[in-house]
């Protein structure tokens, strides 16, 4: 059986003074999450705001527990960055139509 979940995280980057500095932070989060945790990741909101961002992450595995473990690790990783304030996060599970 396949289990899939998407994690959305809304962020504030208070020290960012330009889109370039914001994208440096966002690129690090996205690329490191992909490499370290094997999840899909992208900036999905607030692309033109200097101090705001919404990131989306997705994980697929053969067990719900493994998906939860992966996304928990991603959340801890994002929360661990002192230059970022997490404004909110939420998960959406993909339901199997069968």
Image (cartoon, rainbow, N blue to C red):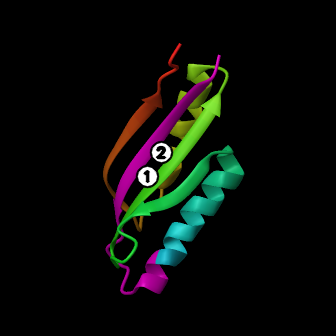
**Mark 1 nearby-residue class (10 Å; few <14, some 14–19, many ≥20):** some
Residue 68 image offset from top left, x and y in percent: 53, 29
**Magenta stretch contains residue 16:** yes
**Magenta stretch contains residue 29:** no
Residue picked out by circle 2: 75
Residue 52 image offset from top left, x and y in percent: 33, 69
Dot 2 falls on a residue whose secondary structure is helix
Residue picked out by circle 1: 79
**Mark 2 nearby-residue class (10 Å; few <14, some 14–19, many ≥20):** some
Location of residue 61 with respect to 21 vertically, above or below = above
Q: CA distance from mark 1 to mark 2?
A: 6 Å
Specify whether 93 is left or right of 37: left
Q: Residue at x 47, y 45 (%)?
A: 75
Residue 40 image offset from top left, x and y in percent: 61, 49
Could you say which disc has been placed on residue 53 in the image? none
The answer to whether mark 1 and mark 2 are in CB contact below 8 A is yes
Is 41 or 78 nearer to us in this picture? 41
Image: magenta residue range: 1-22
């Amino acid at each position: 059986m396949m289990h899939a979940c998407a994690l959305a995280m809304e962020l504030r980057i208070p020290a960012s003074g330009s889109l370039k500095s914001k994208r440096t932070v966002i690129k690090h989060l996205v690329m490191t999450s992909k490499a370290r945790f094997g999840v899909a990741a992208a900036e999905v909101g607030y692309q033109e705001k200097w101090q705001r961002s919404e990131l989306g992450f997705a994980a697929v595995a053969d067990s719900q527990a493994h998906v939860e473990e992966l996304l928990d690790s991603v959340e801890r990783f994002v929360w661990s960055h002192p230059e970022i304030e997490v404004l909110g996060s939420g998960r959406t599970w993909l339901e199997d139509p069968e």
